[in-house]
Image (cartoon, rainbow, N blue to C red):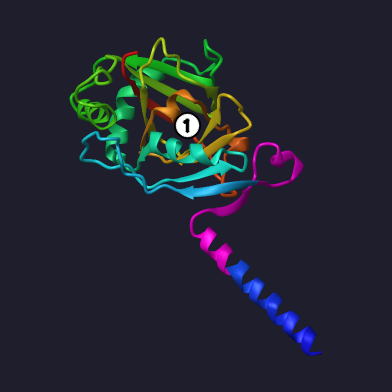
């Protein structure tokens, strides 16, 4: 009996040690089971690592506005050594514009879009159900917002400071989506800045070398995100269609979405 009691005490110590270790680990990385696109049909779950970014470093660039701490869901096969470089290269600025600024922009955009129907496919097969235009000049009300994107997303001087003169405006229908793609280096430099209007959405970044490896993030309405470095070159980015638009098990319904996109010169 004494021998049995001693063995039970040993097992209890081991159990307590394991519990302490797990609690410590869970403060850094929480395992979260969420639906992915195959699980929608199979009713199964795929493990993702949920990582919270508190990254406010702009790699030496001076900026009065700091990116928002962001939650990322990494696929379970995502290489651990690539997590930090990705987090440092994909920055989200929540509430970059107000609702009034959004309305002002939409008044200007609708003058063009109301004359055009949504297209089914893009010339590079990257987008479904969309309308688009390019603008070099904006009205006096909206020009400060467009200039603010330049000031936040791009350096003031140096080789990456030359921003393309035309701003790309993409109108994605509620049932539309953006397929995985990497912006061509022939038309775009080292970073892409995207202002998101009218709707939240889920962005997925797939590693170009193996597209089964990916990371998800919610892109909120009114936010600006900046892709540079590894998120710009090493990952194909997409906006998920509504049937697949889940984050932390919650369905993020994408409505009509306007993207205001600025790029620097190749």
Residue at position x 78%, y 85% from top? Answer: 3
Q: Is residue 238 left or right of residue 57?
A: right
Residue beneath label 1, please?
256
User: Is 233 placed above or below 82 here?
Assistant: above
Q: Dot 1 lies on which element?
A: loop
Q: Quadrant of the N terminus?
A: bottom right
Pinpoint residue 214: horizontal percent, then vertical percent. 57, 35
Q: Quadrant of the C terminus?
A: top left
Q: Position of residue 107 (x, y in %)?
A: 31, 27
Is residue 181 highlighted in magenta? no
Range drawn in magenta = 20-46
Determine whether 256 is above or below 169 in the image: below
Q: Is 137 on the left-hand or right-hand side of 30?
A: left
Q: Going 38% across and 21% down the picture, which residue do you hit?
A: 169
Pointer 1: residues within 10 angstroms few (<14), some, or many (20+)?
some
* Outermost residue, front side: 3
Most foreground residue, 30 or 225: 30
Q: Position of residue 53 (x, y in %)?
A: 41, 47
Query: Which residue is at the far bottom?
Result: 1
Q: Which quadrant would residue 9 be assigned to in this image?
A: bottom right
Q: Is residue 265 left or right of residue 211?
A: left
In this view, the residue in front, 217 or 143, is 217
- Residue located 38% across and 47% down the image: 69
Q: Residue 40: within the magenta? A: yes
């Amino acid at each position: 009996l004494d021998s049995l009691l001693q063995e039970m005490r040993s097992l209890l110590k081991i159990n307590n040690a394991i519990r302490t270790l797990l609690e410590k680990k869970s403060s850094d990385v929480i395992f979260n089971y969420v639906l992915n696109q195959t699980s929608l049909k199979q009713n199964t779950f795929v493990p993702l690592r949920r990582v919270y970014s508190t990254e406010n470093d702009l790699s030496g660039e001076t900026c009065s506005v700091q990116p928002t701490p962001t939650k990322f869901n990494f696929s379970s096969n995502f290489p651990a050594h690539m997590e930090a470089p990705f987090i440092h290269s994909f920055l989200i600025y929540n509430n970059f514009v107000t609702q009034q600024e959004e309305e002002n922009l939409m008044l200007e955009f609708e003058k063009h879009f109301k004359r055009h129907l949504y297209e089914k496919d893009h010339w590079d097969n990257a987008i479904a159900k969309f309308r688009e235009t390019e603008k070099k000049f904006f009205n006096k009300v909206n020009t400060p917002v467009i200039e603010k994107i330049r000031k936040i997303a791009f350096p003031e001087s140096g080789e990456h400071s030359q921003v393309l003169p035309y701003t790309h405006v993409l109108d994605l229908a509620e049932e539309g989506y953006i397929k995985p793609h990497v912006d061509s280096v022939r038309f775009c430099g080292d970073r892409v800045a995207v202002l998101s209007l009218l709707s939240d959405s889920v962005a997925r970044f797939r590693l170009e070398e193996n597209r089964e490896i990916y990371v998800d993030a919610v892109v909120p309405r009114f936010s600006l995100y900046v892709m540079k470095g590894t998120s710009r070159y090493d990952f194909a980015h997409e906006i998920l269609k509504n049937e697949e638009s889940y984050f932390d098990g919650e369905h993020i319904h994408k409505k009509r979405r306007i993207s205001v996109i600025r790029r620097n010169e190749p």
